[in-house]
Image: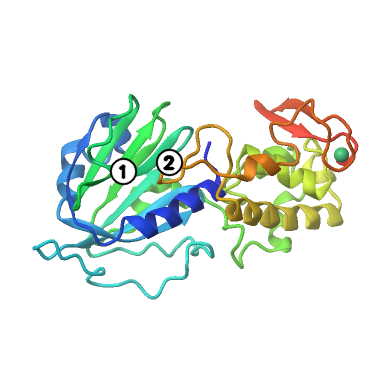
């Protein structure tokens, strides 16, 4: 499942490749890939004649601000530009996604979704779900084996959160000023669930999934089964620091090699080769050589070093 670093990697790729080209049409191969607020036909009609002004990431959501093309293939910046936006690496406060003159396109990849920027002539894989055709014979292709992924069209002059309602449930971005140690400690205070489970809760902090939760707890030296209520102040501080460190490292590596993650140009990431514990059960710890163990916690496989993590 793509987590924050993978979605950030995809977002950066999309910003390099897909902007300011007119969307000429598309094809919805699986209706349920389009969120229910709009029919597949209307979805394509609304996107036609528009271009993408910029892509943003919020948690694991990708959000593209659309711009109306003025004919003749000319697609300038959004007619009413939003205030100057920071790069998606320093993500926006949750309230930032303002109504846009031409609407927004939202994407959530869920378990197995991929967004690929390809030539239209490239053979269609079995699990292709949505195709958007751009000028220059280019195509943004949404491929999704398990079909949990979704795309939204947010109408013009509409708050993004009113259509992509999952955004309302997200906690702060890990790189944002809102995500302080104090905030984190307050949220964990007296909670009876294990810290690993808490880290997967998107309303606590947005973007962490199974891989980086395990990596975070290794770096922090904390056992995944520790109940939030039992964490000491120094442990909470170490976990807070480790979240940021792990995610930054993974972004620097272009996302992970695990599962079926591909960036928009179809290339796998590099983080997998340097993971501390994730997917390494039975192998020696990179720090102390103790064998990495794997358990199930709230239904998710959880990897840890029994010697380094207390
Ligand atoms: Zn160890």
Mark 1 surroundings: few (<14), some (14-19) or many (≥20) residues within 10 A = some
Question: In which quadrant is the C terminus drawn?
Answer: top right
Q: Position of residue 59 (x, y in %)?
A: 51, 51
The residue lying at 40 percent from left, 45 percent from top is: 265
Q: Residue furthest bottom?
A: 84
**Front-lying residue, 217 or 38:** 217
Q: Position of residue 298 (x, y in %)?
A: 67, 28
Report if residue 298 is visible in the image: no
Mark 1 and mark 2 in contact (Cβ < 8 Å)?
Answer: yes
Q: Residue 118 bears which disc, if any?
A: 1
User: Residue 96 appears in which quarter of the rendering?
Assistant: bottom left
The residue lying at 22 percent from left, 69 percent from top is: 76
Up/down of 195 relative to 246, above or below = above
Which residue is disc 2 drawn over? 266
Mark 2 or mark 1: whose residue is earlier in sequence: 1
Which element type, helix, strand or loop, lies under badge 1? strand
Mark 2 surroundings: few (<14), some (14-19) or many (≥20) residues within 10 A = few
């Amino acid at each position: 499942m793509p987590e924050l670093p993978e979605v950030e990697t995809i977002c950066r790729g999309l910003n390099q490749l897909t902007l300011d080209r007119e969307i000429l049409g598309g094809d919805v191969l699986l209706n349920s890939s389009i969120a229910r607020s709009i029919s597949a036909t209307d979805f394509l009609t609304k996107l036609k004649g528009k271009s993408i002004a910029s892509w943003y990431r919020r948690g694991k959501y990708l959000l593209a601000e659309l711009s109306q093309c003025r004919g003749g293939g000319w697609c300038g910046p959004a007619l009413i530009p939003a205030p100057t936006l920071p790069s998606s690496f320093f993500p926006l406060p949750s309230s930032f996604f303002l109504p846009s003159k031409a609407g927004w396109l939202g994407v959530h990849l869920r378990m197995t979704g991929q967004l690929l920027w390809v030539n239209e002539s490239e053979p269609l894989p079995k699990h292709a779900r949505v195709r958007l055709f751009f000028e220059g014979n280019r195509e943004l292709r949404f491929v999704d084996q398990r079909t949990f992924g979704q795309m939204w069209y947010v109408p013009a002059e509409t708050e993004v959160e009113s259509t992509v309602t999952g955004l309302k449930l997200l906690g702060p971005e890990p790189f944002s000023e809102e995500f302080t140690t104090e905030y984190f400690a307050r949220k964990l205070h007296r909670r009876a669930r294990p810290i690993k489970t808490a880290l997967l809760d998107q309303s606590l902090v947005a973007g962490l999934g199974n891989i980086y939760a395990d990596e975070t707890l290794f770096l922090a030296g904390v056992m995944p089964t520790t109940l939030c209520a039992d964490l000491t102040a120094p442990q909470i501080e170490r976990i807070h620091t480790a979240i940021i460190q792990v995610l930054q490292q993974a972004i620097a590596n272009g996302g992970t090699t695990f599962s079926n993650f591909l960036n928009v140009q179809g290339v796998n990431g590099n983080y997998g080769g340097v993971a501390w514990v994730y997917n390494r059960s039975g192998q020696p710890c990179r720090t102390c050589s103790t064998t990495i163990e794997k358990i199930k916690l709230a239904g998710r496989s959880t990897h840890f070093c029994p010697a380094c993590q207390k």
